[in-house]
Amino acid sequence: MSVNMKDSLEKVDSEITGAIKNEHTRLNEGVELIPSENVVSKAVLQAMGSILTNKYSEGYPGKRYYGGNEFIDVVENLAIDRAKKLFGAEHVNVQPNSGSPANQAVFFALMNLGDTFMGFDLTAGGHLTHGSPVNFSGKQYNCVPYNVDKETELLDYDQIKKDALKAKPKMIISGLTAYPREIDFKAFQEVCDAVGAYHMADIAHIAGLCATNVHQNPVPVCDVVTTTTHKTLRGPRSGMIMCKTEDRFDKEGKRNLAQKIDFAVFPGLSGGPHEHTIAGKAVAFLEDLQPEYKTYCQQIVKNAKALADSLMDQGIELVTGGTDNHLMVAKLVNKGLTGKGKEVQNALDEAGITVNKNTIPYEPGSPFNPSGIRLGTPAVTSRGFKESEMKVIGESIAKVIDNLNDKTVIEGVKKDILELCKQYPLYDDFQILG
Ligand code: DSN
């Protein structure tokens, strides 16, 4: 094969083209209910697929280690300014490549190795980077986890405060990946104030809801807030850190809080930022600043409540008995499916419904064979689904769960789902860019 730099992807690489087209068909013909996923606009895709991928720009706008960055600075400054406006943030770093590196940078900026912090237990709704023993956060730092109340499955802020007074953490992380209720960031801040800890909120899942005040916004409250940009924010797969300028525990230090965060990202952890992705973030933030985006975020929550109601009407139990945000966790124990989250995930996949197996609080199975599935509405809401479609999807999910090994039922559900999806085509003007 001779390489011609001007040939299209379709002409150059039929294997990658085929995989992209198949993924498009999968998305178009199925219902995407993984709560951490979404579908981006064509404008975001174009920014990410642009020539900005060519450039090295180590450093920050106006202070780069390479020449030729005048237009890259325009891109990065636009992303920063739009994010500040969206969240009311004092300082923003748009360079982390995803949520985990963003969280790692905060650990690096605010703590010394071995320091104690508190994070939400992974099986009850936290994240790997909130102190899991197999992650840098649990290996290199001393994590004292907090959990939900066994009966209510809700966060118990009085208990968290008692635990914090004992543990004396340097930092407390608030945030979620599988907790279906509103997080009270002010209550977490009170705990942090009582024990003299930094407060880091990880809003990767709920960032869009926070930016539009559909959920409490932690940015005015916390020292530092991290997020991914590809979930409810509906931007490219990436991350971001927002923080106060001043470090309230180190007012005389060599660097203020904003400078500590920036220094931890670069040169602490990363080299050249991915400016094509930063351009995608800038475009997404511009979209998120429009009034329709708030309506979208409100619809995410309405759809989640409709899906939760539909599932519960079919006898499926949910963690905490419902949802306040974009996600819910279905418990399979009362269906005789303890430890069978993976089987349910696979059966739903066959029916064209994508969810992920998930642990439930005080999991009786194991992380690899958990007793729940996690579902969420950001992607289906982007597609245009409303409450009536969520009711049908809830009924379809229940049918699969109740007939896990019945291929005829699963085939029937698949047909219904395909009919539903045909009414809401996704990327119908799809073409491979380039
Ligand atoms: N992996 C993400 C999720 O699915 O919740 C969190 O980063």
Image: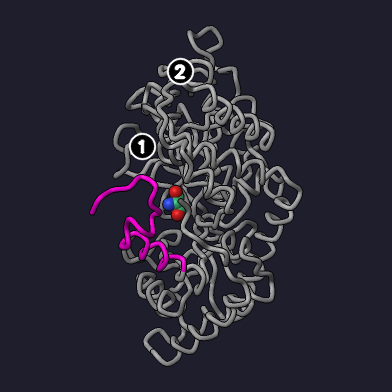
Does the magenta-highlighted stretch encompass residue 20?
A: yes
Q: Residue 78 location in percent, x, y?
A: 62, 31
Q: Foreground residue, 182 or 271?
A: 271
Q: Residue 337 location in percent, x, y?
A: 39, 77
Q: Which residue is mark 1?
A: 137
42 over 114 or under it: above or below: below
- At x 46%, y 71%, the residue is 25
245 over 87 or under it: above or below: above
- At x 65%, y 49%, the residue is 209
* N-terminal-most mark, 1 or 2: 2
What is the span of residues highlighted in magenta in the rendered image?
A: 1-24
Quarter the N terminus occupies: bottom left
Q: Residue 399 location in percent, x, y?
A: 50, 85
Q: CA distance from mark 1 to mark 2?
A: 30 Å
Q: Which element carries disc 1, helix, strand or loop?
A: helix
Q: Callout 1, which amino acid?
A: Ser
The crowd level at tag 1 (other Cα within 10 Å; few <14, some 14-19, many 20+) is many
Q: Residue 310 location in percent, x, y?
A: 62, 76
In the rendered image, is residue 141 in sight?
Answer: yes
Q: Foreground residue, 389 or 139?
A: 389
Q: Which element carries disc 2, helix, strand or loop?
A: strand
In the rendered image, is residue 102 in sight?
Answer: no
Q: Foreground residue, 174 or 229?
A: 229
The crowd level at tag 2 (other Cα within 10 Å; few <14, some 14-19, many 20+) is some
Left or right of 418 in this view: 54: left
Q: In the image, which is nearer the foreground, mark 1 or mark 2?
A: 2
Q: Callout 2, which amino acid?
A: Arg
- At x 47%, y 34%, the residue is 275
Q: Which residue is mark 2?
A: 64
